[in-house]
Amino acid sequence: MKASVYDIVTRKIIDGLKMGNIPWKKNWTSIGGLPKNFASGRHYRGVNQLLLALNEYESPYYLTFNQVQSMGGTIKKGSSSEQVVFWKVYKKPVKTSSKTHEDKAHEILQKRFVLRYYNVFNSAVIEGIDFPQPQQYDHEPINAAVDVWNHFRNRPELNTGGNYASYSPKHDRITLPPVERFVTAEEYHKTLFHEAIHSTGHRSRLNRELHAATDTEGYSFEELIAEIGAAFLCAHAGIHHDETNTQAYINGWISFLENQNVRTIIRAASKAKKAAQYILGESLPHDQDAETANENSN
């Protein structure tokens, strides 16, 4: 029987995995780095790294209101600030008795720590100050890839911005950096396809269980599904797809799985095929898929 595109891509991935691990790279340009104060050049530490990383700004640079003014900048009207916390130390005299040669009470200083906060503004809402910017690229649209997305029935919302790629099941929303931040148009669509495969697990589509990141094994398996599914969609759209990047990505996740073998890839590929078929509008088979057949044979 003639091999389908799904079979061909799956075999290429499995063959590549047998050749060992290689590095995986991010597909878009970024200023990068941990959140830092632009005036002092110092990185925020501890919980402040987490607080500032939770927002959707693509720039890591922040300034206080006074720093913005001193550097000749202004804050865009209506912009919101972010809170940075710190411990304020107060010293309070406390009397205590201590036996000395004079047997007199004396005073000691007791330190008291109080949590305080101050506001900072991201460079995205500051005008009049030159901040480093990520490189931008001009791309010719890939019509076949655009058609894949446009024909995705009941597709999730697509939000552009920030410095990360993700799918939120709670909001049924994909978030991607702007297309001009990607080195190539192919990389943009490959990343979009990865998140689109995730979105097929939503209860309004294939109702696949989407595990939280804290569930390492379940989350890892879902990442395998998304990456293999993206490779399927790239093949359908005629996008030149470097399987070595996919193999490296899969290797990174499969190391967390208990069964590190070809069967794990086959199971993920089966679910990825269903997800790709859903996006492409292909009719899903009613017979047993590869995963079910394998499980019944064990």
Image (cartoon, rainbow, N blue to C red):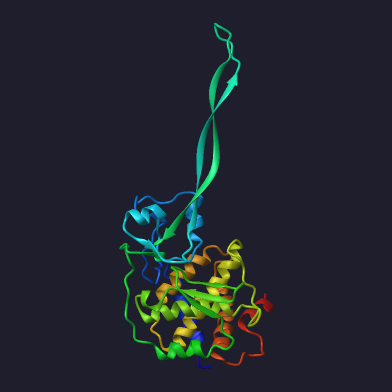
Residue 166, relative to residue 111: is it above or below?
below
Q: Nearer the viewer, residue 9 or 166?
A: 166
Rendered image quadrant of residue 103: top right
Query: Where is the C terminus found, in terms of image quarters?
Result: bottom right
Q: Nearer the viewer, residue 15 or 148?
A: 148
Q: Position of residue 37 (x, y in %)?
A: 38, 53
Q: Position of residue 72 (x, y in %)?
A: 31, 58
Q: Position of residue 6 (x, y in %)?
A: 51, 85
Q: Is residue 142 left or right of residue 101?
A: left
Instruction: Determine the residue positioned at 57% across, 83% down.
Output: 275
Q: Is residue 23 left or right of residue 150?
A: left
Q: Residue furthest top?
A: 101
Q: Position of residue 248 (x, y in %)?
A: 44, 69
Residue 42, relative to residue 286: is it above or below?
above
Rendered image quadrant of residue 263: bottom right
Residue 258 visible within the image: no
Q: Residue furthest right?
A: 296
Q: Nearer the viewer, residue 50 or 98?
A: 98
Residue 202 visible within the image: yes
Rendered image quadrant of residue 223: bottom right
Q: Nearer the viewer, residue 112 or 46?
A: 112
Residue 101, relative to residue 109: is it above or below?
above
